[in-house]
Image: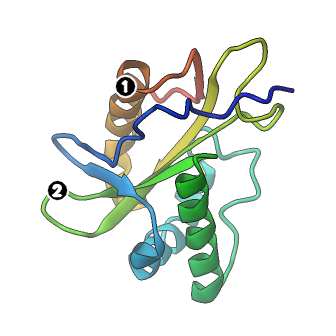
Amino acid sequence: MSDQPFVPADFAVPDGLTAEQFRLEPLGPQHNAADFAAWTGSMDHIRATPGFAATSWPHEMSLADNLRDLERHAQDFTERGGFTYTVLGIGIDDVIGCVYIYPPRDESPGGGAGERRARVRSWVRADHAALDPVLYRTVLRWLERDWPFDSIEYAPRT
């Protein structure tokens, strides 16, 4: 266990990323209806996405429960304990996916022996399945280039 924070105190957490086919912005309560529609319409697809097979999400929940979940993600972001970004289409505010950047579950936020580790998961809606490997490659390059992690656990896409 480490007392080291997930990211250094002086690290400026990116407020998003704009790529050719999508943009990322911090997930928050303002995305509730679109986020809820995105994942509830793609539950089987998300469960089949690399990184989600061994998780309990997605699971049935109400729109109010989803709002509480988004509020928790926004609080994690503010407290710098984890960072969740919504994936939006270019030029529209339609939620097409999500990216989660958190410490590995098996340790405290900072990693062991001074190493900063991140566990990343992402999903896209079933009707945007072709975007999944593009999102993976773009996010992985962004994390390697702009974030302070020594290692990144992120299930590869083919």
Query: Which residue lies at the image location 57% right of the left edge and 79% below the top edge?
Result: 67
Image position, residue 118 (x, y; %): 61, 30
Q: Is residue 112 left or right of residue 137?
A: right
In the displayed orientation, state which residue is furthest to the right.
Answer: 1
Return the disc, 2 or 1, that comes first in the chain's sequence. Answer: 2
Image position, residue 133 (x, y; %): 38, 34
Image position, residue 42 (x, y; %): 50, 65
- Total tally of numbered discs in the picture: 2
In the displayed orientation, state which residue is furthest to the top.
Answer: 113
Q: Is residue 116 above or below residue 58?
A: above
Which part of the image, by quadrant, shows the N terminus? Answer: top right
Circle 2 packing at 10 Å, graded few (<14), some (14-19), many (20+), is some
Q: Is residue 84 left or right of residue 92?
A: right
Please name whichever residue, 126 or 12, is drawn nearer the observer in this view of the structure.
12
Q: Which residue is mark 2?
A: 90
Q: Amino acid at mark 2?
A: Ile
The circle on residue 26 is none
Please name whichever residue, 39 or 153, is drawn nearer the observer in this view of the structure.
153
Image position, residue 99 (x, y; %): 48, 48
Q: Is residue 35 above or below residue 47?
A: below
Which part of the image, by quadrant, shows the C terminus? Answer: top left
Query: Which residue lies at the image location 47% right of the left edge and 32% below the top edge?
Result: 10
Query: Which residue lies at the image location 63% right of the left edge and 71% below the top edge?
Result: 69
Q: Amino acid at mark 1?
A: Asp
Q: Is residue 11 above or below residue 98?
A: above
Please name whichever residue, 30 or 135, is drawn nearer the observer in this view of the structure.
30
Quarter of the rendering containing residue 107: top right
Q: Is residue 126 above or below residue 145?
A: below
Quarter of the rendering containing residue 26: bottom left
Q: Which residue is mark 1?
A: 146
Front position among marks 2 and 1: 1
